[in-house]
């Protein structure tokens, strides 16, 4: 029987922010109910801090499958409020990453990843992409 992956969310939602639960529920609805979640809080809008945590946790080998769901996107680029592009890649150690390609998020890991892909997805009008758009992308990648 396949092991359900652990979804490790690295984001700049505040400690105690209901965004964590909303995103986890949306991922569970899209991907199935038997996922495990881990959270790492990044400093608000700090893609450098997010990149540090992605390297710290993502480059570590894990016994079970690990998927990193990374969203610190201060929306400094993109048309209007469209936000930064979404990318998918695997680390050489097998860990997978779905991340907003923002600022310094990948600065510590570029030498350790395979096959970086820009992800196209249906963009809703929602400003909360990690809850409303990205879970469907994650479900497709996990299939």
Image: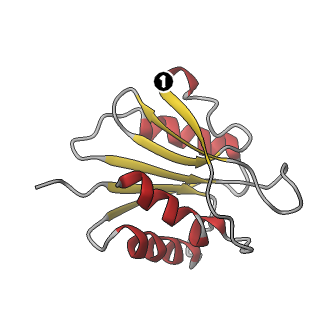
Q: On the rendered image, what quadrant is the C terminus found in?
A: bottom left
Residue 39 at least partly seen: no
> In what quadrant of the picture does the N terminus appear?
bottom left
Q: Position of residue 69 (x, y in %)?
A: 50, 53
Residue 89 vs 70, above or below: the answer is above
Identify the residue at image location x=50%, y=35%.
55
Say above or below: 23 vs 86. Answer: below
Q: On the rendered structure, is 32 left or right of 98?
A: left
In this rendered view, identify the residue nearer to me: 44 or 128: 128
Q: Position of residue 130 (x, y in %)?
A: 60, 65
Residue 7, compared with residue 123, is above or below; it is above
Is 82 on the left-hand or right-hand side of 71? right
Specify the color scheme. secondary structure
Provide residue 52's location: percent of width, then percent of height.
57, 38
- In the image, residue 118 lies at what x, y percent? 62, 41
Q: Is residue 18 left or right of residue 59?
A: right
Whether residue 102 is visible: yes
Identify the residue position indicated by label 1 in the image: 112
| Label 1 element class | helix
Residue 49 occupies quadrant: top right
Q: Residue furthest left?
A: 1
| Residue lying at 57% horizontally and 71% vertically, measured from the top left | 131
Q: Is residue 46 above or below residue 48?
A: below
142 vs 122, left or right, is: left
Between 124 and 33, the residue placed more toward the observer is 124
């Amino acid at each position: 029987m396949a092991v359900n992956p652990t979804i490790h969310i690295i984001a700049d939602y505040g400690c105690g922010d209901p965004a964590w639960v909303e995103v986890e529920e949306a991922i569970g609805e899209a991907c199935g109910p038997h996922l495990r979640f881990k959270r790492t809080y990044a400093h608000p809008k700090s893609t450098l801090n997010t990149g540090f945590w992605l390297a710290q946790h993502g480059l570590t080998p894990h016994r079970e499958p690990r998927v990193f769901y990374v969203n610190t996107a201060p929306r400094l680029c993109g048309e209007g409020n469209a936000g930064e592009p979404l990318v998918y890649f695997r680390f050489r150690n097998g860990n997978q990453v779905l991340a907003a390609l923002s600022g310094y998020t990948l600065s510590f890991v570029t030498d350790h990843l395979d096959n970086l892909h820009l992800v196209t997805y249906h963009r809703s009008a929602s400003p909360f992409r990690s809850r409303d758009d990205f879970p469907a992308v994650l479900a497709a990648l996990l299939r």
